[in-house]
Amino acid sequence: MESYKREFIQFLEGAGVLKFGDFTAKSGRKIPYFINAGEIKTGDQIAKLGEFYAKSYLEKVGNKRCVLYGPAYKGISIAVAASIGLSKCGLDVPFFFNRKEAKDHGEGGVFVGYVPKENEEIVIVEDVITAGTAIRESMEILSSVKGAKVAATFVMVDRKEKGKGEKSAMAEVGEEFGFPVYSVVDVYDIIEYLSEDEKNAENVERIKKYLEVYGAKA
């Protein structure tokens, strides 16, 4: 495993972002582990997360100046952190996010921050994709932006789960909307990391059994 992947998983676990147990995903699936960006609560933690997203962005997108979009609520802090991380690398990108309810006073509207211009490329930053539900919601919200063009989506972890069919949710989203979905690590990296310590044997077995049912075939 690449060192940065191990470092990232250690960071997620240490910050309480990666947890093991019994959870219910937004898709309704009962899952044995959970990725929750809402557990990031300090300046050092959010700065570190931004560095990982910035690294992924530069590796996949390069120095292209896209607009970062962070879906409310968890995506908001990720977008801010990623933009700061990129700024420290010499790439100053704008960001914006949505309100859960449109504001009917002041400047009004559903978005806060930068207003994308027509044909400007947008990069969505999220915490995780399980069945693609959240990304489809984001695309519906972004449809109100004239000429919106999403270039890519970045998430912390690729869960390698089925979407609506046998393909992974990330693959389905990419095919449906015509843009790639990138992750810093995937669930098999997490399994490899956990397998290095025997005390994690139960969690490894539970995740593997879950993937036997919900794991994507491609």
Image (cartoon, rainbow, N blue to C red):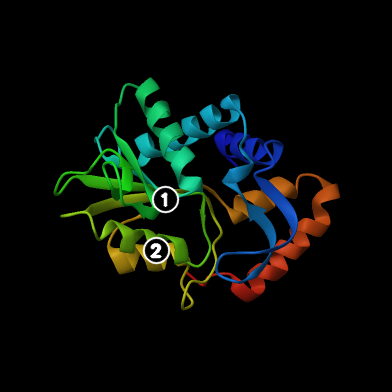
Q: Is residue 204 left or right of residue 18?
A: right
The reply to whether the C-beta atoms of the residues labelled 2 and 1 are less than 8 Å apart is yes
Q: Is residue 79 left or right of residue 42?
A: left
Amino acid type of the residue that numbered disc 2 sits on in the rendered structure: Glu
**Badge 2 is on which residue?**
137
- Nearest the viewer among 21 and 74 is 74
Residue at the outermost front position: 105
Identify the image quadrant of residue 11: top right
Question: Residue at position x 29%, y 56% from top?
Answer: 142
Question: Residue at position x 67%, y 47% from top?
Answer: 18
- Nearest the viewer among 160 and 11 is 11
Amino acid type of the residue that numbered disc 1 sits on in the rendered structure: Pro
Give residue 135's position: percent from left, percent from top: 41, 60
Q: Secondary structure at mark 1?
A: loop
Does any portion of residue 55 appear in the rendered image?
Answer: no
Real-space Cα separation, disc 2 to disc 1, in angstroms: 9 Å
Q: Could you tell which of marks 2 and 1 lies nearer the N-terminus?
A: 1
In the displayed structure, 168 sits above or below 79; it is below
Q: Secondary structure at mark 2?
A: helix
**Badge 1 is on which residue?**
71
Give residue 49's position: percent from left, percent from top: 53, 34
Question: Residue at position x 50%, y 67% from top?
Answer: 131
The quadrant of the picture occupied by the N terminus is top right
Give residue 43's position: percent from left, percent from top: 57, 25
Residue at the outermost right position: 199
Give residue 92's position: percent from left, percent from top: 29, 26
